[in-house]
Amino acid sequence: MNSNQVRKTFIDFFKNKDHKHVNSSPLVPDNDPTLMFANSGMVQFKNVFTGLEQREYKRATTSQKCVRAGGKHNDLENVGFTTRHHTFFEMLGNFSFGDYFKEEAIFYAWNLITKEYQINPDKLLVTIYHNDEIAEQLWKKIANLKDDKIIKIKTSDNFWSMGDTGPCGPCSEIFYDHGDKYFGGPPGSPDEDGDRFIEIWNLVFMQFEQIDSKTRIDLPKPCVDTGMGLERITALMNNSNDNYSSDLFTHIINATQEIIKERLTEKNKSSFRVIADHLRASAFLIADGVMPSNEGRGYVLRRILRRGIRHAYSLGSRDLLFDKIFNNLRSLMGDFFEELNTRSDLIKETLSSEEDKFRETLSKGLDILGQEIPNIKNKTLDGRIAFRLYDTYGFPLDLTQDYLKSKDINVDIDSFNQAMESQKQDARASWKGSGDDGIQKIWFDLAKKYKPTIFEGYTESSISSEVISIIQDNNELDKADRVNQEYILITKNTCFYGESGGQIGDKGKIFNDDFEFQVSDTKKTPQGIFIHLGTLISGLIETNTNIEMKIDIDMRSLVKKNHSATHLLHSALRNQLGNHVAQRGSLVNDEKLRFDFSHNKPITKDQLHDIQQEVINIIKRPSATNIEIKSQDEAIKQGAMALFGEKYGDEVRVVSLGDADGRPYSIELCGGTHVDNVKDINKFQIMGVESVSSGVRRIEACTDKKVDQYLHQQIEAQKDFENKQDLQIQDLKNEISNLQGQINFEEVNKSLFIKKLESYLDSLKNKSILSNEDNNQKIEENINGINFVTQIINGLPPKQLRSIFDNFKSDNEKSILACVTINEDKVSIALGLTRDLASTYDARELIKSAFDHLGSKGGGGRVDFAQAGGDKKDQINQAFLSIKEKI
């Protein structure tokens, strides 16, 4: 069986046992902000197990994408050097939410393994938690296992818990015995980590709830959570205990050999394995919206990808590789994981861009190592230098050791480990997750007590309803009677949109003859309960009271226009920039729209103009909005775009907007509110574009009457600028008149006057240049707590760079400024550090990173400020990136 057949057999088996096949959730969890990546099949069901979320099914089966390469679960350094460690893997699983329990779980597992997969029962043994007598009897009854094939384990290896509190229970693991030709002992023995006995399936029986460290009670509805690694079971189905022998990896390894013209050998097989594994992890992370960066999840992706690139380099590869072998991954797994197809352009562009950038720094890293060799004493390289190469250029320690081994030089491992541990402590301290620490108990209780709110706001702006709950300070109340106090109201049904999908929540009022409540915001809990936040204006509110609800219709109208315009903008960006463009975030309110998207290059003025004009052209062509409810699979086949980070059910809402020669211009899965016809958007104006992080850009725009307001503000700003210029000219005239009064031209050489006049004219010109945004591009980003600012100024004389840095230094702390001026065919760069960084960085060293890109032959300066010149204008952004890498 190949991997696709193994996966299909598993899923079909459980579908035939009335399990709902649930698609894998994204690698970035949407229900656990403390978790860096999904690392098991149960992650997407966590709220179901805890009771916070209800599903329409009680049995499920999945093949879940998982990554273990960051935070607590980190297998990165072992990958490629063992037969079973991976950064990316698939976890096959079946789940029961209060339906069946131990007997059915064991029965299903044994039948699938021995009958469907036809694995020899004599090769199997199991472990159980030492006091789980029921599991022991069931294994004897169902599988006819003898005592010597049922191993009792006392440690936590066979008892699973979600945390210090919450659902927990014993485990039972199924092992395969590969025979005595492999070293290793059975589970629980001193030699259990060998290659002979391999775990293939773990069955978790959640039957308890841990209340505190001393109290554990029975769950009213026990659950089942199982996990079987696709890579392991596929290898086993092909009579191997080496995961890398399965088609999941050989498909990529064979392609790599063909492209780089290097054969796999025992000596280099680790590098081929690293490349195959890291391509898988990188491609799936990018497909799920993670982009390479210097922090959080993006940093983990960058480390994975760069480690793979380094191994390709060690095999002799000098050309771009990863975007080419991605095609093999896509052909193997794209039928099951559709995102590899729909986001292939984004994946390939990101892979090639990151590989291109890193190959240059990799070469520089080798040069740096070569430069350090003459300074080495006692044939031992300082481990801190080895760590700097590892941390800055992605050189693992083994590469440095291999490079130096031929020169009979060792590496001081102790100082390397000290530097590594210091970084790990910093990383652990900096990883805080990405959201709230947890869901408040009040929402847990309400989810058990109330059904999801019925939303009628797509068609209604005012409705009658009933107050079912009143909340203040996380306490549920019977009444709200304090005027001007803030409360939360929960109603049976609502016409108020709850914030989601980037669209803000509605405002409005809730009222009857006895009270008025002003709603300032509306949100929606993960369980589908709408909460109306606001202030009691007058009267008394009691639960079970009949009420009227009315949204702010003017606000909703503006929000609808901005939301629909966001969809049109998304399509225009893909048409103008390429299909790699994918939404990375958005904000839609009544003032503007903000759209973050993946794109690795700056957007030119011409491109921005064409994007805006394309949206305007669609708006000018009246076309009714079409909204349908379809199955997710049907919608995707129709061409609908599913967005990063959004969670969709089996039935999805498909929003089609605009007319493009008889077909919809934009088709997206969306739960937001939209205009009835694109002509209702009326006007569209892009207000600005900026880079928000590596590979991600942001556009802000407005619609309808907000366009008129924006353009009016721009006109006023231009008038203000012109008035300031007029004042500066008047100041110049006054200065000239003053000088004329002071100087006797018959006695004093006119050069003094001319010099002062020229100085003032230069000053005026420089002020004009700096105040013109078209001539002055500035981007700020945070790199590990350091504010890194890049600036490009057209027409500013190089001698003015020093004064720009002086002003920058006086206004900033812990900051680095890299500023380039362009004058005709020449460029000048200055790099300055604020005083608090002068002991950590040297401006003279940092600026050297830009020399090759700018065509510079050298520069000068001191620790906190350095300058250089050059004659290349087309690689300024690459120069900034090189400086950023060095930082």
Image: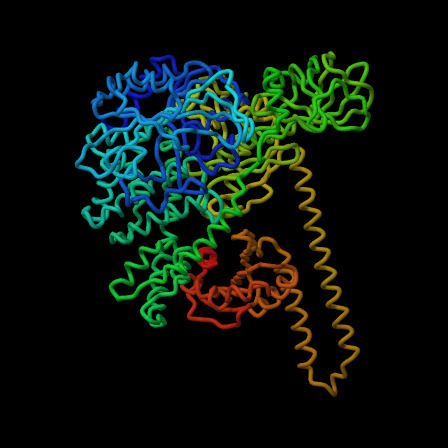
Residue 43 pos. (x, y %)? 45, 29
Q: Is residue 330 above or below residue 717?
A: above
Residue 517 pos. (x, y %)? 76, 22
Observer-nearest of 158 and 291: 158
- Position of 682 compared to 397: left or right? right
Seen as rendered, the residue at the extreme left is 181
Residue 342 pos. (x, y %)? 39, 31
Observer-nearest of 220 and 190: 190
- Position of 3 compared to 490: left or right? left
Report whether residue 561 is seen.
Answer: no
In this rendering, the count of numbered labels is 0
Residue 497 pos. (x, y %)? 63, 23
Observer-nearest of 790 and 34: 34
- Position of 731 compared to 882: left or right? right
Q: Is residue 783 above or below residue 491?
A: below
| Location of residue 634 (image quadrant) | top left
